[in-house]
Image: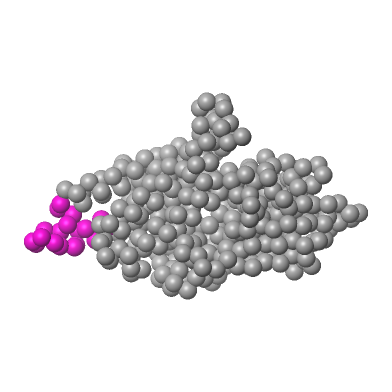
Amino acid sequence: MASFRGVDYMHIDSLFTEEELLVRQTARRFVDEQVLGLIRDCYREGRFPMELVPKMGELGFFGANLEGYGCAGLGNVAYGLIMQELERGDSGLRSFVSVQGALVMYPILHYGSEQQKQRWLPRLQSGEAIGCFGLTEPDFGSNPGGMRATARREGDHWVLNGEKTWITNGSIADVAVVWARAEEGIRGFLVEKGTPGYTTSDIHGKLSMRASVTSSLVLTDCRIPADNALPGAVGLRTALSCLTQARYGIGWGAIGAAMDCYETARQYALTRKQFGDKPIAAHQLVQEKLAWMITEITKAQLLAVHVGRLKDQGKAEPAHISMLKRNNVAIAQQCARLGRDLLGANGITDEYPLMRHLANMETVITYEGTDHIHALIIGEKVTGIAAYR
């Protein structure tokens, strides 16, 4: 299998440091050599490639932009490039790494006790342990503040009741970061696999994100030690801060999916011949589609690099990341559609990655803030009016 040469119309590589390019090459090689040969079968079978978890741990992908406890401590642009390459392989793979780092390791690092950090972060970083993030409920997705899950203090324990759904990694997780409504407000808790009253079940019949584990979590008088509460995770804002970290990675990951769709369509158009001996790439309508794709990918790259630099400087705001996520996922979705169109009937087969990426983007444009919710976040930023309230 030929190595991916990248998509760089505007000399974007000149904006990266040597370390960032090396990190990208490491992730790119991993995807080329370890992911692409098996991901089609994983998607067909509806299974996540668990065999890749130890290797990703060894390469430092989990919590790569976090400091300490075995984490790589990379800058946010280098981290973004890892997400880009992983999603070039498949959205399910990038989602696993995003959840592990941004939604589980991040809240433990920033809101957990030292004991919680020592116990969980090294194991999560290596892939020895797997985590999930329980915020969304059956009746509350875009409005997490309406959650019904409750947490009641009883002596040295908390008692949790409620249901969470659409939880990536749910049934395979060793620890869940669960958000519930306590007397003092919404709080975050660590619920360990095997705790009495805590059960999981997988969601089946998915036509998107098939190479990913998606589950429901049920808490029925689930008693956890008081020490399992994340001491700093008080208020919905702390939960949303974790989503901001994950949304940043999605903004980069979508570029990888778009790149794969573009390059697949470009190569196909150069070899497929119709209406004579010329390849279809010689036709105006085909070139117009490729021109749109490469233009939008280039704009998405520049947006991602700039937001990454702002994030490294502590200047990136949630609304900036909303624009990154919303724009880049939308163009990836359209690149997949255009690429499928250029391949004609061949585009619907899983011999090519286009329909897999297109189906995955239908999930990615919905989760961790729908396209519409991010539009309202941007709208609030530019008008000062919160239209979703």
| Drawn side of residue 267 relative to residue 225, left or right | left
Residue at 53% from the left image edge and 51% from the top image edge? 367
> Residue at the right extreme?
155
> Residue at the top extreme?
383
Q: Range of the magenta residues? A: 265-283
Question: Image quadrant of residue 159?
Answer: bottom right
Residue at 19% from the left image edge and 49% from the top image edge? 285
Residue at 44% from the left image edge and 51% from the top image edge? 254
Residue at 73% from the left image edge and 41% from the top image edge? 235
Q: Is residue 254 above or below residue 356?
A: above
- Decide whether residue 379 is among the magenta residues: no
145, 339: nearer the viewer:
145
The answer to whether residue 127 shows anywhere in this view is no
Where the C terminus falls, by quadrant?
A: top right
The percent coordinates of residue 267 (x first, y second) are: 25, 59
- Decide whether residue 277 is among the magenta residues: yes
| Drawn side of residue 369 relative to residue 148, left or right | left
The answer to whether residue 378 shows anywhere in this view is yes
Where the N terminus falls, by quadrant?
A: bottom left
> Residue at the left extreme?
276
The percent coordinates of residue 344 (x first, y second) are: 25, 61
Specify the color scheme: one colour
| Drawn side of residue 274 relative to residue 259, left or right | left
The percent coordinates of residue 29 (x first, y second) are: 42, 62
Callout count: 0
The percent coordinates of residue 91 (x first, y second) are: 47, 58
